[in-house]
Image (cartoon, rainbow, N blue to C red):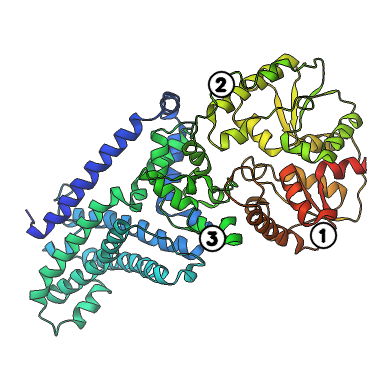
C-alpha cells in the first residue's frame, strides 16, 4: 500500500466535504414542495435526464454561459473547473495504467510522489506531458483570477465582488492548491527525474536547493490546502461547484420556483458563484452608483438568513441580472418570496369587484391595466383597433378599475394578490370569451404565469401583429425612423421581442439602439422598487433615454404604460405606444 501521513489532511477534507454535501442534498430534496417532487418523479426517467447531463457538462464544467457574457471570465472559470476535473480523470487513468483500477483513493492526487514504476513510452512522455499541460492550463486560469481580484478591468468588469472573510480564507486555500502541487511535483521531479516538460524544467532549475529536505514540506502543504478548501466549500460561495449540477438536473426535470421558499430555493441560493456579472449591468449601479444591493449580495444574505428589507426591496425587478446570470438563478422570483408580507388580511377588501357587470358574447376581453389608465391615448387607440378589426370587446377594467394583482405580489402581499386573481378569474370565466388582450406587460405576465386561465392570452402587440399578418387591418408605411424600447416585463420576463418589431417595420423604419432586446435598460419607473426617490428614478430614466436617442429617432416607441409615462416626462413629443402608432395609421 502506497501511503504517507501527508495524505491524511486530504482524506479528512474529502470525507468532510462529501459528508456535508450528502447532508445538504438530502435536506434540500426533502424540502422540495409536493408539486416539485411530483415533477421530479414524472421526468427523472425521461430524455430530460440525458439533456441535463449534456447541459451540466456545458455549463458546470465548460461554463458556456460565462463565455457568452465575458470571454476572459469564461476562460478563467473553465480552465480552473474543467482543468481540475481533467487532472483528476487523467490522473485516475494514469494510476490505473501503472497499477490497478482499485488503487488508494489519494493515489491520483499524489501520484508523482508515490510513483515507482518502470516507464514505458506512454508513462514517460504521454502521461507526463498531458498532466503537466493540464496543470499549466489550470494555473493560467488561476493567474487570471488572481489578477482579476486586484484589477477587474482585465476581464471587462468595472466592479469587484465583495466577499466575506470565510470566502477569502477559502479563496486563499484555492489559490494555494495548484501552485503548491506544481512546486511539490517539480521538487520530486528534480529528485527522481519523473516530471513532464513543465515540472521537470522547474525541478532541474531547483537542483541547487536541498530538494530532499523540501519535498515533504510541499507535499504536506499541498494536502493541507486541499483540506482547507474542501472544509470551506460547503459554507462559502464555492458550494456552487457542486450545487450547480443539482440545479441543472432539477431545472431540466421541470422544477421552478414557487410562491414560498422551498428546498429548490436553497439550491438556487447555493448555486450562485458570486461571479459579479450582475453588478455591472444593474441600472442602480450604472445610473446611481449603488453597488451593494445587487442580486449577488441579496442571494448571499438570503443564503445565510440575514436578509434586510433595504436590500430585498431596493430592486427594479427588471430581470437584467437574471438574463445575464451564467447559472440562471431566478433572483427576481426569490426576492418576491423574501418580500412576503401579511398586511390587511380582510378577505372582503375586494368585494367591490363582485359588483361588476360581466359582458358576454364578445370576441375579446380587453384588460388595459391600472397604469394604462394614466396613458388614456393608448386605451383609445386600442378601442379604435378593435373596431377596425370588427371585433366586439369587453373593457374589463374600464369601470371600477381592478388590478391584476402582480404589483401586490411583487411587494410580497401574496394572499391579497391571490384574492384578486380568484375574483378576476371568476369574472373572466363568466364572460365566456376565448381571447384576453392585455395592454400592460405587468398584467400580461400575471395572466400568463400566475393565473390558470383557460382562454388565449395576448399582449396587445401580439394581437396587433396577428391582425396585420392575417390582413385584418392594413397599414401604410412611412419614412418615420422609429426606435423601440423593450419593456422589462414584456421582453426579458416574457420573451416578446419580435412582434413589436414586425409592427414597426410595417409602419416605418426600425432603428436598433446599442442595448435592446435582452439588454434593454429599464425605464426606472418599474413598480418593483418602492425604495427609490423620484430623482433617482429620473436618473435611471435618463440613462435609458440616452441609449435610445443615440440613434436620432423621429419616434421612441414602447409597449408599456409605465415606460411611456417615464419617457414622456423626459421627451414628451416623441414618445408613443405601438398601439397609438397603429391607430394613427389605420
| Dot placed on the residue nearer the N-terminal end, 3 or 1 | 3
Q: Is residue 170 left or right of residue 511?
A: left
Q: Nearer the viewer, residue 461 or 50?
A: 461
Q: Position of residue 320 (x, y in %)?
A: 58, 51
Pointer 2: what residue? 346
Say whether residue 93 is visible. Answer: no
| Dot placed on the residue nearer the N-terminal end, 2 or 3 | 3
Q: Residues within 10 Å of mark 3 (few under 14, many from 20)?
A: some
Mark 2 and mark 1 in contact (Cβ < 8 Å)? no
SS for dot 3: helix
State the CA–CA distance, disc 2 to disc 3: 42 Å
Mark 1 and mark 3 in contact (Cβ < 8 Å)? no
Pointer 3: what residue? 280
Q: Is residue 202 above or below residue 413?
A: below
Q: Nearer the viewer, residue 34 or 419?
A: 419
Q: Nearer the viewer, residue 537 or 423?
A: 537
Question: Which picture quadrant has residue 24?
Answer: top left
State the CA–CA distance, disc 1 to disc 2: 50 Å
Q: What residue is at 67 percent from the left and 22 percent from the top?
A: 424
Which numbered dot is residue 416?
none
In this rendering, the label closer to the viewer, 1 or 2:
2
Mark 3 and mark 2 in contact (Cβ < 8 Å)? no
State the CA–CA distance, disc 3 to disc 1: 27 Å
Q: Position of residue 111 (x, y in %)?
A: 17, 61
Q: Is residue 433 above or below residue 450?
A: above
Q: What residue is at 11 percent from the left and 55 percent from the top?
A: 8
Pointer 1: what residue? 553
SS for dot 1: loop
Q: Is residue 442 left or right of residue 398?
A: left
Q: Residues within 10 Å of mark 1 (few under 14, many from 20)?
A: many
Say whether residue 145 is visible. Answer: yes
Q: Position of residue 385 (x, y in %)?
A: 87, 34
Amino acid at each position: 500500500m502506497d501511503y504517507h501521513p501527508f495524505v491524511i489532511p486530504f482524506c479528512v477534507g474529502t470525507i468532510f466535504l462529501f459528508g456535508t454535501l450528502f447532508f445538504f442534498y438530502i435536506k434540500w430534496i426533502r424540502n422540495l414542495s409536493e408539486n416539485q417532487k411530483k415533477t421530479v418523479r414524472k421526468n427523472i426517467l425521461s430524455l430530460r435526464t440525458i439533456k441535463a447531463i449534456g447541459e451540466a457538462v456545458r455549463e458546470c464544467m465548460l461554463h458556456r454561459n460565462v463565455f457568452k457574457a465575458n470571454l476572459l471570465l469564461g476562460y478563467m472559470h473553465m480552465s480552473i473547473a474543467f482543468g481540475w476535473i481533467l487532472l483528476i480523470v487523467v490522473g485516475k487513468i494514469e494510476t490505473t495504467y501503472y497499477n490497478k483500477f482499485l488503487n488508494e483513493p489519494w493515489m491520483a492526487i499524489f501520484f508523482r510522489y508515490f510513483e515507482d514504476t518502470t516507464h514505458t513510452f506512454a508513462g514517460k512522455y504521454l502521461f507526463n506531458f498531458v498532466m503537466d499541460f493540464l496543470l499549466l492550463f489550470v494555473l493560467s486560469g488561476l493567474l487570471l483570477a488572481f489578477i482579476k481580484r486586484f484589477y477587474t478591468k482585465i476581464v471587462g468588469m468595472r466592479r469587484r465582488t465583495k466577499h466575506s472573510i470565510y470566502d477569502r480564507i477559502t479563496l486563499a486555500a484555492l489559490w494555494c492548491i495548484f501552485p503548491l502541487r506544481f512546486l511539490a511535483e517539480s521538487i520530486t521531479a528534480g529528485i527522481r527525474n519523473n516530471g513532464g516538460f513543465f515540472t521537470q524544467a522547474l525541478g532541474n532549475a531547483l537542483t541547487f536547493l536541498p530538494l530532499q529536505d523540501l519535498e515533504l514540506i510541499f507535499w504536506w502543504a499541498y494536502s493541507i490546502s486541499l483540506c482547507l478548501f474542501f472544509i470551506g466549500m460547503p459554507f462559502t460561495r464555492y458550494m456552487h461547484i457542486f450545487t450547480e449540477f443539482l440545479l441543472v438536473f432539477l431545472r431540466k426535470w421541470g422544477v421552478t420556483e414557487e410562491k414560498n421558499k422551498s428546498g429548490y430555493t436553497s439550491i438556487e441560493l447555493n448555486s450562485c458563484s458570486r461571479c459579479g456579472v450582475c453588478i455591472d449591468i444593474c441600472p442602480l449601479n450604472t445610473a446611481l452608483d449603488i453597488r451593494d444591493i445587487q442580486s449577488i449580495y441579496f442571494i448571499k444574505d438570503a443564503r445565510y438568513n440575514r436578509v434586510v428589507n433595504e436590500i430585498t426591496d431596493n430592486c427594479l425587478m427588471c430581470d437584467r441580472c437574471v438574463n445575464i446570470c451564467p447559472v440562471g438563478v431566478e433572483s427576481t422570483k426569490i426576492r418576491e418570496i423574501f418580500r412576503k408580507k401579511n398586511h390587511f388580511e380582510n378577505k372582503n377588501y375586494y368585494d367591490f369587484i363582485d359588483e361588476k357587470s360581466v359582458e358576454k358574447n364578445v370576441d375579446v376581453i380587453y384588460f388595459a391595466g391600472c397604469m394604462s389608465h394614466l396613458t388614456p391615448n393608448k386605451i383609445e387607440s386600442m378601442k379604435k383597433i378593435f373596431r377596425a378589426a370588427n371585433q366586439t370587446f369587453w373593457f374589463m377594467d374600464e369601470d371600477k378599475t381592478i388590478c391584476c394583482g402582480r404589483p401586490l405580489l411583487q411587494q410580497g402581499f401574496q394572499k391579497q394578490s391571490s384574492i384578486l386573481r380568484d375574483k378576476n378569474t371568476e369574472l373572466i370565466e363568466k364572460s365566456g370569451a376565448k381571447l384576453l388582450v392585455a395592454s400592460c406587460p405587468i398584467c400580461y405576465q400575471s395572466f400568463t404565469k400566475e393565473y390558470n386561465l383557460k382562454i388565449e392570452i395576448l399582449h396587445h402587440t401580439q394581437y396587433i401583429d396577428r391582425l396585420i399578418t392575417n390582413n385584418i387591418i392594413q397599414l401604410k408605411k412611412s419614412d418615420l425612423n422609429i426606435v423601440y424600447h423593450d419593456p422589462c416585463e414584456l421582453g426579458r420576463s416574457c420573451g416578446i421581442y419580435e412582434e413589436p418589431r414586425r409592427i414597426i417595420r410595417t409602419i416605418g423604419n426600425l432603428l436598433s439602439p446599442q442595448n435592446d432586446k435582452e439588454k434593454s435598460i429599464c425605464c426606472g419607473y418599474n413598480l418593483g422598487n418602492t425604495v427609490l426617490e423620484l430623482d433617482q428614478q429620473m436618473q435611471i430614466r435618463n440613462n435609458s433615454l440616452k441609449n435610445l436617442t443615440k440613434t436620432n429617432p423621429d419616434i421612441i416607441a414602447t409597449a408599456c404604460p409605465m415606460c411611456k409615462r417615464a419617457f414622456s416626462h423626459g421627451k414628451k413629443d416623441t414618445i408613443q405606444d405601438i398601439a397609438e402608432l397603429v391607430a394613427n395609421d389605420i
